[in-house]
Amino acid sequence: MAMMTREFNAVDLSDPHEAALAVKRKALELGADVVGIGNIERWDNAPLQMDPKQIMPECKSIVGMVFRVERGSLRGIEEGTFFSNYSAMGYGGITYLYMPITVINLSKFIEDQGYEALPMGHQSDWRSISNGGVLKKNFSRPVRPGQAAPDVMLHLRIAAFLCGLGEIGFSKMFLSPQFGPRCRVGMVLTDVKLEPDPIYDGPKLCNRCMACVRACPGNCFPTDRTVKVNLAGHEVEWSDIDIKGCDTAFRGMVHTGEKQDDPYLREENPERNFDTVPGSWSPFYHRPKKLYQSGQAICGARGCTRACMISLESRGVLQNSFKQKFRRRPTWSVDWSTEPEFSTETKFQKAVKNEVD
């Protein structure tokens, strides 16, 4: 019996319109929830360290894909009983498992037809710039004069906007008309010319209701400081996020400024986290171990995703609608100054080993 292999050059991608249809159909077939295309010219004014042409100089098109975060993966945090599911299934699992498989296989489909394709998931672990867009000191150097220092980091939310997939909200979260903020974004860079989609011009998603501002446990969205950028001729504005505050609230902790005998975050950067205690949005005595390397979203995206989603759903602007509203009981809060009240059925281990990284 002869070996079997993939079929090459079976799909003609020479016509940009037909090629775009073929690539979009394949992306949906492979597991993306939404797919759009941006032509490379939309990135003409990108900063050097975020310029896709620094990665693929002959890039002609960028395929952007939305991967939904299931509403149900937020249910356990909303009820205060099952936190790991969002970090695992709605966060790390999509970022490090599901999305890479999809973008890799879409890239294979394009390369089978004789064009180069570069798959990009949500992760950028080797990026040379910080979350604030500043080059890290003594991290890497350009290999040629004037080039970007490796690794270049493409701004995925901006990429999704430029691929016509939706808006960037006040919280800087990407909002799709299908799922609102329940999105992860993946991309494929390619040198095949694909017909681009128009920049999103549908029903307004972010109406500046400020639900994200009010609900964020870290108060990370200032209303008096914003960032304004021009994206392919469109003025876009979002809150100048307190990134350090977000990183702290994300993990479920508060910095007290006073040394703690048993800090909430014990093993990671002890010189910086010696004063940490759990916040009212965390039921854990210490931060649980990471899931899929980065998943540790103890806050459960309380402001940027859950509050925003509730607001969008109440306005009826999302295509993915549900039979029941998301918030069905009063929001919970942990009072760490009081003793816990366990069920009378609770049985305790004689000794509990705390799990830390």
Image (spheres, rainbow, N blue to C red):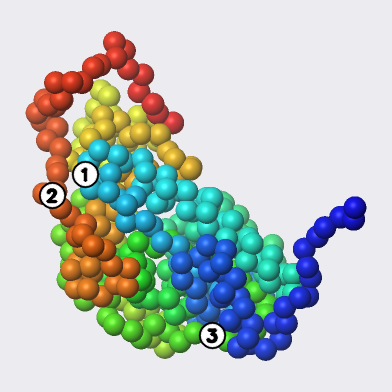
Looking at the picture, how far across and down is residue 50, in whole percent?
A: 52, 69
The 10 Å Cα crowd at callout 2, few under 14, some 14 to 19, many 20 or more, is few
91 in relation to 102, above or below:
above
The numbered mark at residue 79 is 1
User: Which of disc 2 and disc 3 is earlier in sequence?
Assistant: 3
Query: SS class of the residue under badge 2?
Result: loop
Q: From mark 3 to mark 1, how far is it between C-alphas?
A: 42 Å
> Between 48 and 44, which is closer to the camera in this rendering?
44
Q: Return the residue found at the far top.
A: 350
Residue 228 seen anywhere in this rendered image of the structure: no
Disc 3 to disc 2, C-alpha distance? 44 Å
Amino acid type of the residue tagged 3 in the rendering: Pro
Quadrant position of the C terminus in the picture: top left
> Which residue is rendered at x = 15% and y = 59% of the image?
214
Tag 2 near tag 1, CB within 8 Å: yes
- Label 3 CA crowd tier, 10 Å (few <14, some 14–19, many 20+): many
Q: Which residue is drawn at 45% across and 57% down?
A: 130
State the residue in front, 68 or 162.
68
Quadrant of residue 225 in the image?
bottom left
- In the image, is 248 to the left or to the right of 149? left
**In the displayed structure image, the side of residue 26 where residue 112 appears, left or right:** right
The Cα atoms of the two marked residues, 2 and 1, are separated by: 8 Å
Q: Mark 3, mark 2: which one is toward the viewer?
A: 2
The residue where tag 2 is placed is 329
Q: Which residue was labeled with disc 3?
A: 196
